[in-house]
Image (spheres, rainbow, N blue to C red):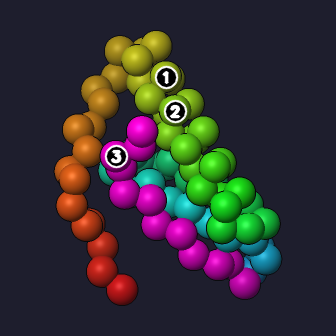
């Protein structure tokens, strides 16, 4: 289960939903629906973590709290 904060928003420029994972630098995904962008975000998180492990990079511990406010 993903414990990292995921921020979803609609991009008028790209005409898709965007998901950002602020605790994992550069971890983002997109999709045509909120459901698909969330699924893609979970896949992106897993790939980010797998890559960090492969290269011995540090993996941030999820903060478990809201990082951004609208």
Asked which secondary structure carries label 1, the reply is helix
Mark sitting on residue 58: none
Look at the picture and state if 51 lies above or below 5.
Answer: above
How far is disc 2 from disc 3 in space, using C-alphas? Answer: 11 Å
- Along the line of sight, the residue nearer the viewer: 12 or 45: 45
Asked which secondary structure carries label 2, the reply is helix
Q: Quadrant of the C terminus?
A: bottom left
Q: How many marks?
A: 3
Name the N-terminal-most of marks 2 and 3: 3
Q: Residue 40: x and y, percent?
A: 65, 48
Look at the picture and state if 47 lies above or below 31.
Answer: above
Determine the residue positioned at 50% across, 60% down.
20
Mark sitting on residue 3: 3
Few, some or many C-alpha atoms within 10 Å of disc 2 (few <14, some 14-19, many ≥20)? some
Determine the residue positioned at 44% across, 59% down.
6
How far is disc 1 from disc 2 in space, using C-alphas? Answer: 6 Å
Few, some or many C-alpha atoms within 10 Å of disc 3 (few <14, some 14-19, many ≥20)? few
Asked which secondary structure carries label 3, the reply is loop
Span colored in magenta: 1-12
Task: Let me know if residue 53 appears in the view.
Answer: yes
In the picture of the structure, the residue carrying the numbered disc 2 is 46
Left or right of 39, for residue 59 = left
């Amino acid at each position: 289960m993903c414990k990292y904060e995921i921020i979803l928003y609609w991009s008028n420029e790209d005409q898709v939903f965007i998901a950002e994972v602020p605790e994992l630098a550069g971890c983002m995904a997109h999709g045509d629906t909120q459901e698909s962008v969330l699924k893609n975000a979970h896949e992106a998180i897993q790939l980010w973590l797998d890559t960090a492990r492969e290269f011995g990079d540090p993996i941030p511990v999820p903060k478990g709290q809201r990082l951004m406010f609208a």
